[in-house]
Image (cartoon, rainbow, N blue to C red):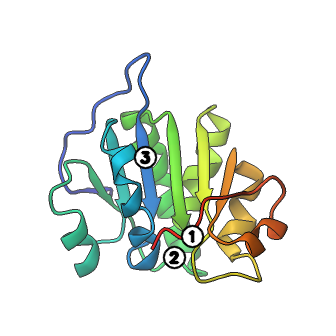
Amino acid sequence: MTRWRRHRLRPGQAGGQRILLVGSSGGHLAQLMPLEPWWREHPHAWVTFDTPDALALLDDEENVIWAHHPTARNARNLVRNTGQAISVMRRFRPTTVISAGAAVALPYFVLARLTGRRTVFIEVFDRIRTPTLTGRLVSPFTDLMLVQWAEQQALYDDAIEVGPLL
């Protein structure tokens, strides 16, 4: 069953961006926070894990969906998060799904691609010479691949360097 922090997800409206930020707690979530000047201007929702750091970071947010974890090599939680992703995508109707990983992003990116929504993946700060597993898995479903180091550009076709977010 989907565990909603607050029940205020509203359907998408024509014309505006609706941002869905998806990421594991910890460093993945922390790398989405510096984008606040952008996502704060739009209706947005979060998908992450109910850990102490996420609870603290997202305390003032209205729309927080707690994903099932652990996700690393856990088929049961992948299935559960896929079901949750279907529900969230139907209810919130985001125009853009953005993530810095990790595995919880996969079902959201697949569904976003299948339903014609934009996807943005940010490769993490601390993997410079090799791609992350999540980066490799979501790259076929990613419209925009952002990297934080020049060295990471060689890891993905058409990656754009944005510089360090932390």
The picture places residue 33, in percent across and down from the top left corner, at 36, 62
Disc 3 designates what residue? 20
Asked if disc 1 and disc 2 are in contact, CB closer than 8 Å, the reply is yes
Which quadrant is the C terminus positioned in? bottom left
| Left or right of 33, for residue 52 | left
Residue positioned 39% across, 71% down in the render: 30
Q: Which mark is drawn over residue 71?
A: 2
**View extreme (top): residue:** 14
Dot placed on the residue nearer the N-terminal end, 3 or 2: 3
Vertical placement of 10 versus 125: above or below? above
Residue 51 in view in this figure:
no
| Left or right of 82, for residue 159 | right
The picture places residue 54, in percent across and down from the top left corner, at 28, 72
- Check disc 3 and give the amino acid type: Leu
> What's the distance in space between the residues labelled 3 and 1, CA to CA?
15 Å
Vertical placement of 142 versus 19: above or below? below
Could you classify mark 3 by the number of other residues whose Cα lies within 10 Å: few (under 14), some (14-19), or many (20 or more)? many
Which quadrant is the N terminus positioned in? bottom left
The picture places residue 57, in percent across and down from the top left corner, at 24, 68
Residue positioned 19% across, 72% down in the render: 56
> What's the distance in space between the residues labelled 3 and 2, CA to CA?
19 Å
- Check disc 1 and give the amino acid type: Ala
Asked if disc 3 and disc 2 are in contact, CB closer than 8 Å, the reply is no
The picture places residue 112, in percent across and down from the top left corner, at 59, 41
Q: Which mark is drawn over residue 103?
A: 1
Is label 1 or label 2 in front? 1
Asked if disc 3 and disc 1 are in contact, CB closer than 8 Å, the reply is no
Q: Secondary structure at mark 3?
A: strand
Q: Which mark is drawn over residue 70?
A: none
Q: State the residue in front, 99 or 84.
A: 99
Vertical placement of 46 versus 40: above or below? below
Could you classify mark 1 by the number of other residues whose Cα lies within 10 Å: few (under 14), some (14-19), or many (20 or more)? many
